[in-house]
Each structure stands twice: as structure tokens, then as C-alpha cells.
Amino acid sequence: MVPMQEQEFTVYPRNGVYYVQFRDPVTGLRGEQRSTRKKTLSEAYAVIADWKRNGISQTPDEEAKSLQEEMAVSSFLKMVRSKKLKTESLERIVSTLKETKYLTAALILDSDATARLIEYQKNFWDYDKSAYIKDKLLHGQRIGRYHSLDCQHRIRYWEEYFGKEIRIGEITRKHIRDFSLWIAEKQVGGNRGKKFKKELPKKRISHATINGIMNAGCLPIKWAYLHDEIPIDPTKGLMRFSGEAKKRGILTESEAQKLFCVEWNDERAKLGSKLSMTSGLRSGEILALRREDIGEDRIYVRHSWSVKDGLKGTKTSKERIAPLIPSIREELLALADSNPHGPDGFIFYGLLPDKPMVGNIFLDEFYTALEKIGITEEERKERGLCFHSWRHYFTAQLAAKLDARIVQHATGHATTEMLEHYANHELEGQLKTLNKAADEVFGNVISFNKKAR
């Protein structure tokens, strides 16, 4: 039997029962097939007329929905199942649901989307519980406890702006864009300096810090989308803040000489600065050194130390060899021999045998020494001087004398494939050249205080 075509619906028999498909007057799309449960055409028309007049319900106990609502829902579900809706369209739908207060009701149907945003973000950066961190580690990728803790701390800005109650499924691109602009206008500081006991001026957050705050909060949201926990990715297409990061400054040769002429409160810190200046080692790499890492003319850089992670691999996860001039070697071995926990422990020992000294001592003593040679706190901040500046000093001094690739290899900044495939005899030759240059350049700085006396 040929289906009977009507302007608003189509009626046709199937397995001895009449079915109907209504047409959406706006889109022209057919709705879902519905059984009238009637075996004659006249009875089917009577049911259809009742539905048009009183609404449709699947069961006697179900509240009837108007035909208009039924068709709108049916058309929308067809579009969704076709997977042809663009992200912008989905965002408009979510935004409208939120504005009309329907979103909260919709979220109840999805337990993942009901997770509160701030709680989800903090759990995402919980090093011991995070599925994201576990996934990275299983795939052989690096992520440290300090980094995850830093990201957790950055979530406080999200909490300050959004509060604790908003749910992750409610977040839209406009929310995140408005938040980023709020961060860009936010001023921080104004508290008293711990050391100098004076008011510090308020200042806006740097663009690099803003990007870090945005990444810390957006990555968990993106993860939720990629794992089908929320329907759209509201972080897609967001612009990063541009601007040059504040550069770390470099001391002059004269300033470096003066630094080692003044008295330091902690000789370990003074030696740490000497070592970083002459070898390019990072603070964490210096703290991790043991006697077994000290060669005749080289340092075997195998580990780094951080408060949260303890002893770990280097920043690049690769071991390297750094130059070691004779006078620094003697001081390192003497410090190792003076370790009250035994000569095989950390060279830069601390109060406990399984931990080195507190790394902040390097920085605090460096700042104090700068003040003693006339570099004020304001000048230091303006020039961007910090302990890491010794690595820049090392690179700048030797780059003028040697091939840049040799210096990069010593500092662990090897970025070309050629450096990855150097033969061992080439490395030996480079190390001799590097050691000779380092002794010539930095030996004068270190011995300056002896000549001055």
C-alpha cells in the first residue's frame, strides 16, 4: 500500500499498524517515526488529530509534549547525530541553554560535566592522582612535581574569578576570553618585601605569566573534551598573549671579580656561584653533585635536584660533560671531604644525609654579595640578575672564543641533530678546547681576589 502524503505529516502502514512522521514546518525535516498503534487508517487519523490538539506522550503516565516541541527536539537530534554541527553552533546552543537556565538541568544528565571546574583543575594537576600525568609518564615523557604544583597554584586565579561552584560543562569560550582579559588587567604585589621590609609597588602580571596561568587552567578543560567528558572545547582558538619575556641579565667581568672579593656568609654558596660561572651548571645540577661526578678535567652532569622531585634526571633528560678547571676541582673535593655525613654524599651537603643544602641559599647569598659591591635591589631587578645569570655569563664569555656548538653542548642547550651524533673522540677534543678556554677566561676572575690582597 502506497503511503498517504499529507502536507504536515506522512502516514503509512508497517506490519499491520499505521505509523506517522510529522514534518517540521520550519526546517521541512521529518521527525521520528511514531506508531499510532492503530490498524485502520481512520483510527490512525483520529490519534494524529488528538496529538496535534493535546500533544504527544509515549505512555499514559508521561506528560504530553506539544507537537511543536516534539518536532524541534526531533530535528535538533537529527542534526546532532549527523555530526555536521560546527563548534560555533554548539557554543551558541550551550550559551542559550545557560542563559535560559536549562543548562544546570542538562548537566545533571552527565556526571562528568557536573564536576566543578576548580576541583577538576586541581585534581588534574595532582601529581599522584592525575590521569594526565600518569599518561605522560607511561609514554616516557617528563613532568616534574614542581611543575604540577606550580600549575596547581596558578589555579587560584581561576578560583578567584569563577568561584568554586561553576561546573566545567558550563564554561564557554567567552568565559575564558573574559577571564584572560581580567588577568591582563590584574595588578599584583604591594606586600612588604620579606628581606628589606618595605612596600613593593603593584604591577601587572607579565604576558609570560598570563600564558602560564591560562595553560594551567585550559589544559584540564581540553583534556575533558578530548575524553568526551564535555561536549565542546571552549579553549579552541584562544589567542596567546605576546610580548618579550624578561631577559636575565649578565654581570660584567669587573662585577664578577668584585663579587668573589667580598666576604660571603656561606662558602658553599660562593663555590656554587664559582662553579656555575665556570661550567654553566644550573642550580639544581650543582645541588645534585656527588664525588663520583667529579672527573679529572670534567664534571659528569647526570642528575638534578628539586625540593618536590628529589634527585631526578637533567632538564633535557640527557647526561652531558661540563668543563672543570683545576682550582674549582680542588675546592669541590675539599668540600666533599668536609661533609659530616660522609665524603660520598652530596658535595653541597645539608643538614640531612639524603638531601643537599637548601637551594635558596645560592640565591640569597648571591643577592647579598651583589649589594656588597654596590648593586642595589632596584638595579638588580631592573637588570634581571639572578643565580641563573651565571649560565649566561659562562655562555657569553666563551661564545666569543669558541664555536657556539661546543658551548651549547657543555651547557645542555644542544638543539641541532649534529650535536646528538658527535663521535666520542670529537667530544674529547672539544672538552680539551673548552677547558683551556674556561681556565683562561674564568681563572682571572677567580684569582683576582687573591691578587687584590
Image (tube, grey):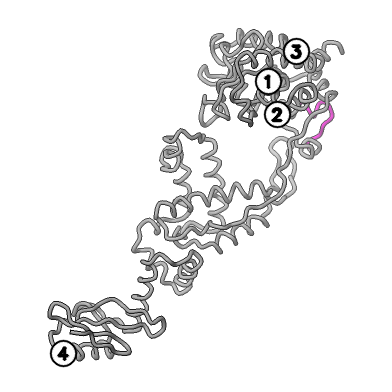
Q: Residue at x 66, y 22 (%)?
A: 410
Marks 2 and 3 sit apart, C-alpha to C-alpha, by 24 Å
Marks 2 and 1 sit apart, C-alpha to C-alpha, by 9 Å
Membership of 370 in magenta stretch: yes
In front: 32, or 188? 32
Numbered tag placed on residue 387 in the rendering: 2
Disc 4 target residue:
43
Q: Residue at x 78, y 35 (%)?
A: 380
Which span is picked out in magenta?
369-377
Quadrant for the N terminus, please: bottom left
Q: Residues within 10 Å of mark 2 (few under 14, many from 20)?
A: many
Asked if the residues shown at circle 2 and circle 1 are in contact, with their CB atoms under 8 angstroms apart, the answer is: yes
Indicate the secondary structure of the residue bearing disc 3.
helix
Asked if the residues shown at circle 4 and circle 3 are in contact, with their CB atoms under 8 angstroms apart, the answer is: no
Task: Describe residue 73's horizontal placement relative to residue 305 as left or right.
Answer: left
Q: What is the x, y in percent for residue 351?
A: 56, 19
Numbered tag placed on residue 436 in the rendering: 3
In front: 387, or 326? 326
- Residue type at mark 2? Phe
Labels 2, 4: front one: 4
Return the disc, 2 or 1, that comes first in the chain's sequence. Answer: 1
Disc 1 target residue:
272
